[in-house]
Image: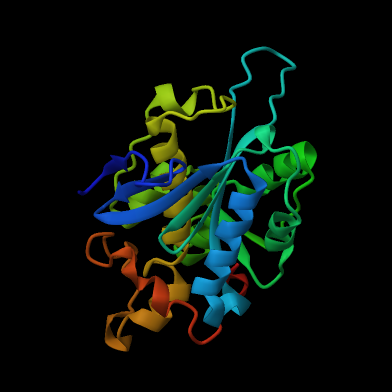
Amino acid sequence: MMDGIEECVAGFPDLYNVWFYGHRIETLVTYESSRVIEWIDETEFIHRRRLHHLVVGLDVEWRPNRYRGESNPVATLQLCVGHRCLIFQPLYCSQIPDALHRFLSDSNYTFVGVGIHTDLELLAQDHELEVANAVDLRTIAANQFNDRSLERVGLKHLAVTYMGAEMDKPRRVTLSDWARDSLTLEQIQYACIDAYFSLSSALHPCLPVTYSLCIAPERRQNTGRPPSLTKFPMVLFPFVNQKGISLKSIC
């Protein structure tokens, strides 16, 4: 399967397989503290050898504000590491687990996204969730390609222009009710891919972190346009940051 979503992994009604460019992303959708703790524990175990430079894709969604002065709280927090994604629904969680506070506030972890600092302000305001170390992908792209206009674009623009990847972001999903307790399959796929693509962009050969480690020296010339997503797929994850290079060094 190239793109799509498989409903509910057998035996786990809150698990889904989301497919993007042929890559399977195991996606947990939950508001239960115990499941969030399990996801964090499993993620840190899987990536235990590189926890000192872990990179995490982050995004949030909320119900659209339809009236002047309306300010709906963050309804979903999406985190993605490797090929695993968490979609957390804090509005229905009786008590946000300490494990999530610790995970987000770990200064060894770098959280990446587009417009991420605005997202983090909302997370702190609505749910008292603080992130210690965050990088906006637009800043990375603007520095890499010496194009300040990239600081004002969205993730879809970065995907198409600099990675050759199409992202389907239908308006009916973007403006849907993210505060509902049971997300639709379209919402789950949309939310997962946003976080996954944020992570993939940060670890893609078009950016210095991966480019300097995974591409042969004779092929590192900056042509102004990066290799396509299909040419350098996201299976590069295990090779990123093996020398301890941090996203912070290029921002």
Left or right of residue 216, residue 200 in this image: right
Res 248 visible:
yes
Residue sitting at x 59%, y 46%:
115
Residue sitting at x 26%, y 52%:
21
Q: Position of residue 163 (x, y in %)?
A: 33, 56
Q: Position of residue 169 (x, y in %)?
A: 38, 34
Residue 249, quarter of picture: bottom right
Q: Residue furthest top?
A: 67
Residue sitting at x 57%, y 70%:
44
Residue 136, quarter of picture: bottom right
Q: Position of residue 18 (x, y in %)?
A: 34, 47
Left or right of residue 247, residue 131 in this image: right
Residue sitting at x 28%, y 81%:
219
Left or right of residue 23, residue 74 in this image: right
Residue 222's place in the image compared with 183, above or below, is below
Q: How is the structure coloured here?
A: rainbow
Left or right of residue 120, residue 128 in this image: right
Residue 98's place in the image compared with 41, above or below, is above
Instruction: Work out whether residue 87 or residue 211 is closer to the camera in this orientation and state it.
Output: 87
Residue 63's place in the image compared with 25, above or below, is above
